[in-house]
Amino acid sequence: MIRVVSAEAAPITFRLREGYRIAGASFIEAHNIILKVTTSDGRTGFGCAAPAEEVTGESPAACLHALREIVIPLLRESDAGDAGGFARRAERLAPGCPGARAAADIALHDLMGLREGRPLVDVLGRRRDRMPTSITLGIEDDPGVILERARRHVAAGFRILKIKTGESWEADARLIRALRATLPPGILLRADGNQGYTEDEARRFLGALAPGDLELLEQPTRAGDRGALARLAAASDVPIMADEAVTSPEDVAAIVQAGGADLVNIKLMKSGGIVGGMAIARRAAASGIGAMVGCNDESRISIAAGLHLALSAPNVERADLDGHLDLADDVARGGVEIEGGDLVPLERPGLGVTVDM
């Protein structure tokens, strides 16, 4: 048995370089909690929680409390070499704090790779070497700001842009058409409604676009209305992705039973980490629907973990792992690189991150 001899949770508020707006909220900073875990075999692994009440249902304060009062004591009682067993026990004890559970799960997986002396993706079972990621454009009152940022991202090599929508379907449709007219034809556009549309508004938004304008539309309507997602997916040629509606394999099954979305967005902060994220990926694959690995605003610790999951999980065809790019003062280095819009893991043991902590 490999024992946890010390575990420390440090809350950090990162400044965002540009900040952004989504339907219903604006952000200028990101609340993360960095977890440092040292084990009896002399190794130290790192995890990261990025709680967001609109996504994970937990506040930063609740996440920190769960880490210090529930998750870390459980780590001290557990075999650090059994990430799956830990994940099952943590879900029973802290069901409402998936971000806190994710931090511990990520640290245990970092330690797993360090123990093996291999990148985590190789321990999990590498299926791919790299994956293109989208980069996000928030809502702006002046569409010219978005067009300029889009041109800048494309010039930097990104080939997929995710456009935040959901406040006004008419303005959103005009923006998508303007982007399509401005950018090279090979650039993919994804729209993310963040639950901002009614079902009718989502239909009108999709109907105002030309075939090929959008690669997909993510969570246009309220997460609890699975029927709306199913009806939109059935009526539209644009694939519909469920995000906030999916936090577990059981949610995937419920969406399929309701008539389905075309895709699901797996986030470590929703699923409680890599063990939970892999379970969602397997259920999506068994249900015949696609999957993407996404993120919140996160340190590259958990971005690296998300990438290792994406490169090893079945049925993951897409990534939206840009949450570290806007952090002005991340405490971690390494983990991932971006080459021509592709995310590539560093070929180092574990997550391949160096953390100043």
Image: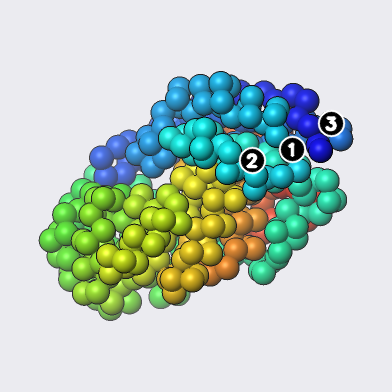
Q: Quadrant of residue 256?
A: bottom left
Type of amino acid under label 1: Asp
Proximity of marks 3 and 1: CB atoms separated by less than 8 Å: no
| Image location of residue 278, percent across then percent down | 57, 57
Disc 1 is placed on an element classified as loop
Residue 86, label in figure: 2
Proximity of marks 1 and 2: CB atoms separated by less than 8 Å: yes
The residue that disc 1 covers is 79
Residue 40, label in figure: 3
Pointer 1 local density, CA inside 10 Å: few below 14, some 14–19, many at least 20: some
Q: Quadrant of residue 119?
A: bottom right
Task: Locate residue 6 relative to residue 261 in the image: left or right.
Answer: right
Disc 2 is placed on an element classified as helix
Type of amino acid under label 2: Phe
**Image quadrant containing the C terminus:** top right
Residue at left offset 83%, top offset 46%: 115
